[in-house]
Image (tube, rainbow, N blue to C red):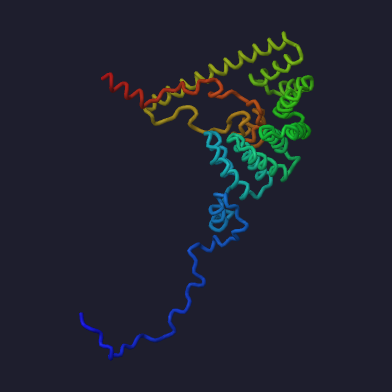
Amino acid sequence: MTDRDDDSDHHFSEGEGFGDPYDDFDLDPPELGVDPSKVDPVDSRVVTDTLDQHNIDQDEVDASELLDVGLNYMQINRYEQATDAFDRTASYAEDEKLEQEAWVNKGVAHGELEEWDEAIGAHREALRIDDSSEHAATAETNLAYALWEFGETTEALEHAEKAIEIDERFAAGWFNRAFFLSERGLSEEALNCVDNAIRLGLRNAKVLETKAEILEELGEFDEAEEIAEEANEMREQAEQEMIDDREEMYGQGQGAGGAGAGRGAGAGRGGRGGAGAGRGGAGRGGAGAGGRGMGGQSPRGGDIGLDDLGVADLGIDLDDEDESERERE
């Protein structure tokens, strides 16, 4: 290593230099140039929603098809994904009726997740758009259901009554009103409401059980026993149909060599009554809403599910069966 010659002159390059080139430099893209004070810190979708507004042209989005995506998620019990799809449908929908439809279904999905505060907000937003449309009665009765579960029992009854004021032929609305009145000890009025629901076509095991309970409260024990027996027969029949469907689904899956899922693999457009997961067939507690989904939810459930019957584990795992076959060989 040689010593530096202190006498030697070294001329460095001269010029204007870099100045301050970092004034406008930012790691974040310009699309995210939002006011932080206006962003909810717990909103996990704010970045996605902001980018959507800049990267996706609204004309390129078919809001109706996006709603179908949410309904399909509902059919396979993917409720969190359904809420996202309905939220985006509402933001892209240009038609107020479609937007209202999305908000009602979003409320139903939140209800399935037992997110009552979010469900209440979604149904209120639907009613804000139009409180007298064809979907308003569904929004009112679902709002009543969510409020009841949230502990707002008085307001729940008010909205249940609004539902049938909007549509007197709304069977699920009459049934929900019967439930709320019965819980308040107003059994005679509750009996009239549940009878109206049955006359309008809402006749299943749960409705009949509710009527039997109301009759017992009124001291009509003989009639209550007859109705309860009819409800048990209806429940047993539904249970047997589910078992048969499950066996048929297993048989089709085995015959396809694991390639097909048999019945139940497709989301369909019927859906569960009271779950808001179908077109028409699932609407308004199974009576048909005229729209997609938006089934009327009831505090004591609606149609019978596998979990309610205790037969959710009837299926056989094909992988376990194949392993057993190899062991026998």
Residue 307, visible in the rendered structure: yes
Q: Residue at x 76, y 40 (%)?
A: 132
Q: Residue at x 25, y 85 (%)?
A: 4
Residue 65, visible in the rendered structure: no
Q: Quadrant of residue 307?
A: top right
On screen, residue 6 versus residue 71, left or right, reads left
- Residue 85: image location, x then y, percent: 56, 44
Residue farthest toward the left in the current orientation of the protein? 1
Asked whether 188 or 94 is in front, the reply is 188
267 versus 178 height, above or below: below
- Residue 205: image location, x then y, percent: 63, 19
On screen, residue 63 versus residue 138, left or right, reads left
Q: Quadrant of residue 206?
A: top right
123 versus 22 height, above or below: above
Asked whether 41 or 51 is in front, the reply is 41
Q: Residue at x 32, y 24 (%)?
A: 323
On screen, residue 55 versus residue 148, left or right, reads left
Q: Quadrant of the N terminus?
A: bottom left
119 versus 187 height, above or below: below
